[in-house]
């Protein structure tokens, strides 16, 4: 399983209600961060960061942190 910090962030994404993030996040959590779900989630978080990464919401810094942790 991935580290606790990443899991906590992904759980927030899974509860976001935003289709772009919540479905891939739930799949990633259910699969314990498998390689396939990690690739899918990485694409979703990158897209979310492009669309919403500087709007000032609570998720803005989480996108960057999740990307760094997913790529580690």
Image: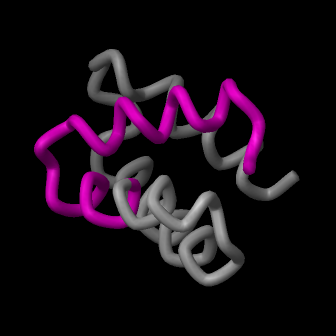
- Above or below — where is 11 with respect to 29? above
Residue occupying image coordinates x 61% and y 41%:
66
Taking depth in this image into account, of 66 and 35 the one nearest to the observer is 35
- The colour scheme applied to this rendered structure is one colour
Counting from the top left corner in percent of width and height, residue 18 is at 15, 49
Total marks shown come to 0
Where 1 sits versus 52, above or below? below
Residue nearer the viewer, 36 or 43: 36
In the current view of this chain or complex, which residue is farthest to the bottom?
36
Range of residues picked out in magenta: 1-25
Left or right: 17, with 44 as reference point = left
Q: Is residue 13 magenta?
A: yes
Which is more toward the observer, 18 or 46?
18
Q: Position of residue 11 (x, y in %)?
A: 41, 35
38 with respect to 47 (left or right): right
In the displayed structure, does residue 61 sit left or right of residue 49?
right
Above or below, 63 relative to 59:
below
- For the stretch drawn in magenta, what is the main secondary structure? helix
Residue 29: x and y in percent read: 48, 53
């Amino acid at each position: 399983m991935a580290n606790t910090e990443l899991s906590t962030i992904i759980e927030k994404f899974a509860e976001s209600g935003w289709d772009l993030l919540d479905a891939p996040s739930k799949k990633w959590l259910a699969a314990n961060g498998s390689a396939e779900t990690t690739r899918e989630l990485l694409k979703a978080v990158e897209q979310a960061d492009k669309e919403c990464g500087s709007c000032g919401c609570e998720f803005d810094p989480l996108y960057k942190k999740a990307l760094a942790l997913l790529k580690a």
